[in-house]
Amino acid sequence: MGLLIFVLILVLLAMAGILGFLVKVALGVALGIMLGLTLAGALVLWRVRRYVRRGVERWRSAGGSSTIEIRDRRS
């Protein structure tokens, strides 16, 4: 019964000329989701690789690791 209603709606949309627009919108949404997931996966992979290469201690120790040297130009 559900399949019959779906086919009927598809036929009515095709007759009205809206079906092509809906297919384009659906493809655009699917492409956007695919690109978003690809970007998120690449970002996670980059963070994991960075974490593994530098090690736990080096990656988390950001504060207090630099020194400042002041030179006086009095001569």
Image: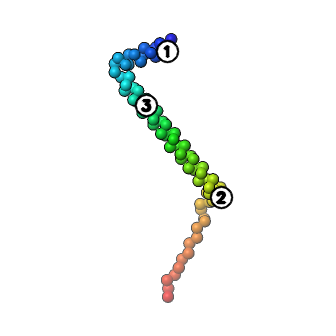
- Going from N to C along the chain, the mark reached first, 1 or 3, is 1
- Going from N to C along the chain, the mark reached first, 1 or 2, is 1
Q: Is residue 59 visible to us here?
A: yes
> The residue tagged with tag 3: helix, strand or loop?
helix
- Find disc 1 in the rendering and name its residue: 3
Callout 1 amino acid? Leu
- Going from N to C along the chain, the mark reached first, 2 or 3, is 3
Q: CA distance from mark 1 to mark 2?
A: 58 Å
Residue at 50 percent across and 14 percent down: it is 2
Q: Which mark is residue 57?
A: 2
Task: Provide residue 27's location: percent of width, then percent of height.
Answer: 43, 31
Label 2 CA crowd tier, 10 Å (few <14, some 14–19, many 20+): few
Check the image and report above or below for 50 versus 17.
below
Residue at 49 percent across and 40 percent down: it is 36
Callout 2 amino acid? Glu
The foreground one among 16 and 67 is 16
Task: Provide residue 43's location: percent of width, then percent of height.
Answer: 53, 47
Callout 3 amino acid? Leu
Q: Looking at this rendering, what residue extends furthest in the top direction?
A: 1
Residue at 42 percent across and 33 percent down: it is 28
Residue at 54 percent across and 77 percent down: it is 70
Could you say which quadrant of the image residue 16 lies in? Answer: top left
Q: CA distance from mark 1 to mark 3?
A: 22 Å
The mark lying in front, picked from 2 and 3, is 3
> The residue tagged with tag 1: helix, strand or loop?
helix
Q: Is residue 56 left or right of residue 27?
A: right
The mark lying in front, picked from 1 and 2, is 1
- Find disc 3 in the rendering and name its residue: 27
